[in-house]
Image: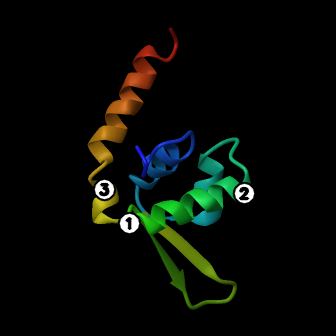
Amino acid sequence: MEYIGGKWKPLILFHLIEGPKRSGELQKKVCGISNKVFTDSLREMEKSGLVQRKVFPVVPPKVEYSLTELGSSLTPILRTLDEWGKRFGQE
């Protein structure tokens, strides 16, 4: 729970299951998150080895986030949580 606990980290990780995302694209998918919390969450998950950040040497700068092997190992758990939420979230 130390690595994925909180309101936003599971959502960010869930959207990265689909594949690499640019920062702005990823943030739009996580509705309601502030820039600071978004950035802090990504940095924490990068530090813990769940997410990797790839910087492309272009102008303007392009940064892409993706799951590491460790982060990808959470896929079944995140999908199960998503299914549970869809099933029981309305109750």
What crowding class fits label 3: few (fewer than 14 Cα within 10 Å), some (14-19), or many (20 or more)?
Answer: some
SS state under label 2: helix
Marks 2/3 in contact by CB < 8 Å: the verdict is: no
Question: What residue appears at the point 44 percent right and 24 percent down from the top-left corner?
Answer: 85
Question: What residue appears at the point 44 percent right and 55 percent down from the top-left corner?
Answer: 16
**Image position of 77 with respect to 39: above or below:** above
Q: Is residue 78 left or right of residue 64?
A: left
x then y, percent, for residue 72 = 30, 56
x then y, percent, for residue 39 = 64, 62
Quarter of the image for residue 20 reads: bottom left
Question: What residue appears at the point 53 percent right and 82 percent down from the top-left corner?
Answer: 55
The residue that mark 1 highlights is 49
Marks 3/1 in contact by CB < 8 Å: the verdict is: no
The type of residue carrying mark 2 is Asn
The type of residue carrying mark 1 is Gly
SS state under label 1: loop
Q: Counting residues from the N terminus, which is met first, the one under dot 3 or under dot 1?
A: 1
Question: What residue appears at the point 37 percent right and 27 percent down from the top-left corner?
Answer: 83
The residue that mark 2 highlights is 35
x then y, percent, for residue 91 = 50, 8
CA distance separating discs 3 and 1: 11 Å
The residue that mark 3 highlights is 72
Quarter of the image for residue 31 reads: top right
Q: Which image quarter holds the N terminus?
A: top left
